[in-house]
Amino acid sequence: MTSIVVQFLNGLAGASTLFLIAVGLSLIFGVTRIVNFAHGSLYMLGIYIAYSAVGAFGAAGALGFWGAILAAAFAVGLFGALVEVLILRRIYQAPELFQLLATFALVLMVKDFVLWAWGPEDLLGPRAPGLDGAVTILGQRFPEYDLFMIAVGPVVLGLLWLLLNRTRWGTLVRAATQDREMVGALGVNQKWLFTGVFALGACLAGLGGALQVPREPAQLFLDLTAIADAFVIVVVGGMGSIPGAFLAALIIGEVKAFCIGLGNVTLLGVEVSFSKLTLVIEFIVMAIVLVVRPWGLLGRPQAAQRAAPTHIEPPLRAAPRGLAAGAAVLALVLAALPLTGAAYTVVLMTDILIFALFAASLHFIMGPAGMVSFGHAAYFGLGAYGAGLLLLRAGAPMEVALAAGPLAAALGAAVFGWFCVRLAGVYFAMLTLAFAQIGWSVVFQWDSFTGGSNGLVGVWPAAWLASKSAFYLFALVLCGAGLAALRRILFSPFGYALRAGRDSPLRCDAIGIDIKRLQWAAFTLVGAFAGIAGALYAFSKGSVSPDVMAIPRSVDALVMVLLGGVQTLAGPAVGAAALTWLQDTIARNTEYWQSLLGATILVIVLAFPQGIVGSLSRLGGRTEAE
Amino acid sequence: MSGAAAVLELAGVHAYYGRAHILADVSLAVARGEVAVLLGRNGAGKSTTLKTIIGLVPAARGEIRFDGRRIDGLAPYRIAAAGLGYVPEDRRIFTDLTVAENLDVGRQPPRAGAPAWTVDRVCALFPNLKEMQHRPGGRTSGGEQQMLTIARTLMGNPSCILLDEPSEGLAPVIVDQMAAAIKELKAEGVAVLLSEQNLHFATEVADRAYIIEKGRIRFSGTIAELAANAEVRNNYLAV
């Protein structure tokens, strides 16, 4: 009984932090319609800055400590304002994908900045002066600081309520959440409203981070952990609902606390480690909520977006006559590559082939089906782990393991996809990212089965594929066949229906096409193709590490598709070749290639806010109109 | 314009939705204290004309002047803050905000040369609003929403107001209230440009009429001239 009370209090303390992160994300989305993927990075910045500020201001005095916490929150808010003015302001009219990518570029850059400024070690801050003891609750000791944290959530909720309901600024923010165009037509300069909201959201995330300083060490992976948590909370609570974010934070905080509290429990003779299942439990909570209320506990059904003159995708063109011949020539040239004896090139080309298939599988749902997944690496990783685990843990031969990879990936895609296709646009992107992060956490934490952070080693192909050249040719055949199959499917009735679903969901409904089912099928299908790529990757490297399903891998795939052009079929392959080659070249020369990648994304997004293809066609359209 | 200075003037304005040419060479003018009506059938370009003036639809060519100053190309908030009020056809009430909060969103500092509105004054114009200050905007009737959307725009103290089909879908008794309100605005010296399909309503409140069809102005003249011209009415307005 006592332990239940203490776990409950632990949950409340955790919920406050979760609320601080999620509420800013929700606020920012409500007004600007931008899902700030960098919100977890702002949280992480909050911890690191507070760590340094506490050191600088002196941790012994209460003034120094609390001053440092507030200064860190303020600094992160200021950084948020800068980001809004310098970057986001230019892309409010851009397609969603570009907005998501721009904030994602920030994730990469902030991470490298933190690595550069604070180094890779975990940094644990001092305890809070005056709150460094513990109180005894029902015979158990409970940290005073956690009691303080329990109060923070409701206090911030109350202050936010006052700000939004008792000030004109708040009234304008709520009005803009509903119809920002009308607010502008009434003479309100939305620019500063947006900047203010973004700064407030950033400040809250920074505060959430700063307040963690005495509780947990500052670590480099906190950004993605925090953003996945925030996405789950926002989806559970309802996008744009502040009380929803609070309620969801309470539920998730409590569920997590009880899982950690339960520890290892033997269920039906099987030892289950609940403390390691926190993310899976989170997923189950989210799944239940999504089934019962797809728009979240306190959210509202997604309103039909106000009609905007949207960009109409040009139809995909059937293959030009020379394509088959060209492809055959290319295949021959590629097949002849090992004859040159360039061993390193063969290895690099194997990577490129694998990523071409991976990128093409993402492109299939992203371009023609209009579903922008931010967690496609989950299926690449499931393929890699599926194959590796079968080989190492069940002793299956390579051929069987290789076939099992895509099956595992398809199974995972079917389960995750069933939930994801219920949402669209940014919600879909958030959910796919959250699932990928959950998958990553499972393989990262499950030491006894997946090898944890060390991953699996000794995943070598059978003897007949042992040479790099043989494996390269094998990958060429498999990836070539995969690319051809994806292309063939796009020009089948199934492919037509998917494109119809992207362009006009209502009309599809009216003519009896079940879009959700089609999208689910497509999601599962491309999961399998990503799984083939993942399994090949595992055998080409001889090992599988959790990195194969980490978020940066998903972003790589997005960038590949983007570089090549979302609405071209050869694009993903070209993009994969370009990015893989670039990474190979840059990564060998700098520690900070992620931020270079981020900067590249930002340049693309800012230079072509309508997309590269969109910018070109806009130029064309203007000359026609003249 | 027979000598009176135009508050609002459009000269050769073109506008597009994507590639569709919606407004072609639209020219019109509204004088201080004058009520002008833009008449036309559904889809003729009435709403687009008003949206182009307020800046929600970009003017591809032509000039729009307000108080003698070019406003085409400005952001909507700048145009509104210059004293041009816009009341959309679909009302666009903030349904989550109370009536009082809706009015607060529209509030702007008083400006020289335009009547200064307060909550009390707009409630005197639309007495229904007085009783429901704390009711959410979404829980008001269609007529009340129409009053609220006009009152909200008035809170910005405009010297000229664009009214998009204020009589649409309203009960006759409310339509009468709208007509009375427009006459009162005119008496206050506010210039009004309204779009209408209801010729009877237009005749009652307007001084000047423009008829638009397929994005082009087909007739301009006083309301008396329109009343005398059965051919124009039959060609462009009869359903």
Image (cartoon, coloured by chain):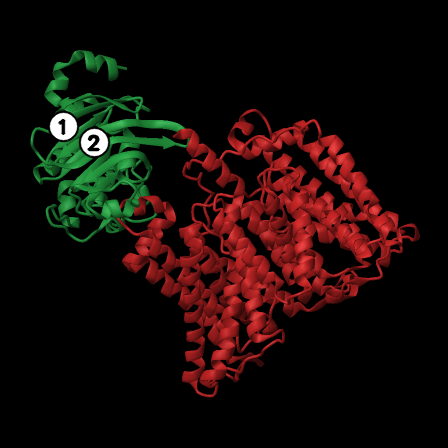
Furthest toward the bottom, the residue is A60
- Using the rendered image of the protein, determine whether residue A87 is visible from the camera's viewpoint: yes
**Chain A shade in the render:** red
Mark 1, secondary structure of its residue: loop
Quarter that holds the C terminus of chain A = top left
Q: Which mark is residue B194?
A: 2
Give the residue displayed 73% in from the left and 52% down from the top.
Answer: A382
Task: Calculate the distance from the C-alpha at mark 1 to the C-alpha at mark 2.
Answer: 9 Å
Name which quarter of the figure residue B71 lies in.
Answer: top left
Q: Which residue lies furthest to the front in this view?
A: A340
Q: Which mark is residue B206?
A: 1
Chain with green colouring = B
Q: Mark 1 lies on which chain?
A: B
A495 up-or-down from B107: above or below: above
Q: Residue at x 42, y 75 (%)?
A: A71
Q: Position of residue A486 (x, y in %)?
A: 71, 37
Question: Mark 2 falls on what kind of element?
Answer: strand
- Whether marks 1 and 2 lie on the same chain: yes
Disc 1, disc 2: CB below 8 Å?
A: yes
Residue B89 in view here: no
Q: Position of residue B57 (x, y in %)?
A: 33, 37
- Specify the amino acid type for callout 2: Leu
